Image: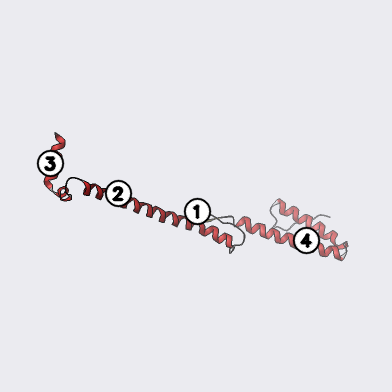
Amino acid sequence: MSYTAPNHYKSQPDLVGYRIAQRLNDAAQDLPHDITQRLKAARMLALDQRQVARRQSASAVSVQGGSAVLHLGGDESSLWNRLASVLPLIALIAGLITIGVLQEQSRAQELADVDTELLTDDLPPAAYTDPGFLKFLSAKSQE
């Protein structure tokens, strides 16, 4: 007996699967009731697993606005997925805050060093603002 597949089966694996299913369905007419029920349960389980695998592989990478987006797959509202998506943002914010604090401390230390040099020098701080002092320094460096 020959089997003709419907037109919507275009790929070879789908066509082979259709033919195997047809032959199994023809032979299933002679099986006892308990075996047919177990086969029905196994078929439903296999279809569910195929749907899950199709959803996971389809949602692994998607393109949005010219850029690729990687999805973690699985349950979207899972605690681990939420934590994994927020953790890089927290690390970035903590890094920026740390950099800001370190730069502020470095600048304060530099200003403190300049103030220390000015106050411990032999010249009074007002001498550095005197325009004649600049001429005195340039004349001294030319000698």
Badge 3 or badge 4: first in the primary sequence: 4
In which quarter of the view is residue 101 placed? bottom left
Rendering coords of residue 26 (x, y %): 84, 60
Label 2 or label 4, whichever lies nearer to me, is 2
Badge 4 or badge 1: first in the primary sequence: 4
Local crowd size for mark 3, using a 10 Å CA cut-off: few (<14), some (14–19), many (≥20): few
Q: Residue at x 73, y 54 (%)?
A: 15
* Residue at disc 4, secondary structure: helix
Q: Left or right? Give the position of 114 relative to 91.
A: left
Is the residue under label 4 in contact with that under label 3 (CB below 8 Å)? no
Label 4 or label 1, whichever lies nearer to me, is 4
Badge 2 or badge 3: first in the primary sequence: 2
Q: Amino acid at mark 4?
A: Ala
Local crowd size for mark 1, using a 10 Å CA cut-off: few (<14), some (14–19), many (≥20): few
Q: In the rendered image of this protein, does residue 136 appear above or below residue 83?
A: above
Q: Compute the Cα span from label 3 to label 1.
A: 63 Å
In which quarter of the view is residue 98 placed? bottom left
Badge 3 or badge 1: first in the primary sequence: 1
What residue sits right under mark 2 in the picture? 110
Q: Which residue is outermost to the top?
A: 143
Q: Amino acid at mark 3?
A: Phe
Pick whichever, 128 or 52, lies toward us.
Answer: 128
Q: In the rendered image of this protein, does residue 9 appear above or below residue 34?
A: above
* Residue at disc 3, secondary structure: helix
Residue 67: which numbered mark, if any? Answer: 1
Q: Residue at x 85, y 65 (%)?
A: 34
Badge 1 or badge 2: first in the primary sequence: 1
Pick whichever, 52 or 66, lies toward us.
Answer: 52
What residue sits right under mark 3 in the picture? 136
Label 1 or label 2, whichever lies nearer to me, is 2
